Amino acid sequence: MSRRALRGEYIETDTGNKVARKATLVGTQNIVLGGKTVIQAEVMIRGDLIRSIQSSSSSSGGPPNNTAVAIGRYCFLSRGACLRPPGRLYKGAFTYMPLRMGDHVFVGPASVLQAASIGSHVHIGAKVVVGEFAIIKDYVRILDGTVVPPNMVIPSFTVVAGQPARVIGEVPEGGHEAFELRDLYKTVGNNPQPAPA
């Protein structure tokens, strides 16, 4: 019998993040997790894709801001999801811009995100592709299999579907509680609790 403690499936940080040991986080020094975030197995976060050209405001002696991916609190990244900062030509050179994600964001399995910004209380379904520099506002539901084209702006309180994506409805009044991910967070980890009935 081994004297070493059993290693769980997840690494749990001081701020409550639960990161699967089988997740791939590249460039971890450029990834910011807000706390209480779940990253399941086979998730890939590309923190190595950082801004190669520093803006004139950061060249005034302060430290450069190399955050590639910033994730808020109570976010849930499902198995096989990929987060990748968007890139473009800027001042004659190719560079990457940061991907910013708000709080209570659910990303479904096998989804690929290259958005510039994702608001809070957003539900992204399975096998969704979000194109480069798309902006997703707060309280948005993106249905399974949707392809959001590059540079699209999705307004708040909308339901989006299709290939290419288009607004097909609104989030109903009183339907905002469905975006809360605190209970889902508790059901994952090395000591999961059963889901509330």
Image (tube, rainbow, N blue to C red):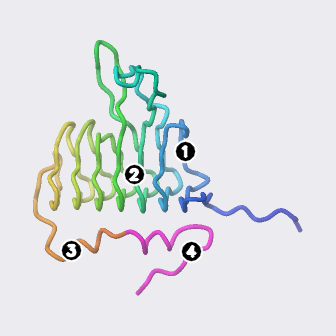
Would you say the residues marked 2 and 1 are in contact, meaning their CB atoms lie under 8 Å apart? no
Disc 1 marks which amino acid? Thr
User: SS at mark 4?
Assistant: loop
Mark 3 near mark 2, Cβ–Cβ under 8 Å? no
Q: In which quarter of the image is residue 144?
A: bottom left
Q: Where is residue 168 in the image (x, y as percent from the top left)?
A: 10, 59
Q: Are marks 4 and 3 in contact (CB under 8 Å)?
A: no
Q: Closer to the N terminus: mark 4 or mark 2?
A: 2
- Residue 54 is situated, as x and y percent measured from the top left of the image, at 39, 21
Residue type (three-letter) at the residue carrying disc 2: Ala
The residue beneath circle 3 is 175
Residue 57 versus residue 131 in the image, above or below: above
**Mark with earlier residue (3, 2):** 2
Residue at the (55%, 62%) spot, across then down: 16
Left or right: residue 146 compared with residue 87: left
Q: What's the CA distance linking mark 3 and mark 2?
A: 25 Å
- N-terminal of the pair, mark 3 or mark 1, is 1
Asked which quadrant contains residue 180, the reply is bottom left
Q: Nearer the viewer, mark 3 or mark 1?
A: 3
Viewer-closest of 192 and 53? 53
Please name the residue that numbered disc 2 is placed on. 110
- Amino acid residing under circle 3: Gly
Q: Residue furthest bottom?
A: 197
Q: Mark 4 points at which residue?
A: 192
User: Counting residues from the N terminus, which is met first, the one under dot 1 or under dot 4?
Assistant: 1
Disc 3 element: helix
Answer above or below: position of 195 versus 101. Answer: below
Residue 124 among those drawn in magenta: no
Prevailing secondary structure of the magenta residues: loop
Along the line of sight, the residue nearer the viewer: 61 or 157: 61
User: What is the distance, in whole Å, between disc 4 and disc 3 at their CAs?
Assistant: 26 Å
Q: Where does the magenta region start and end?
A: 181-197
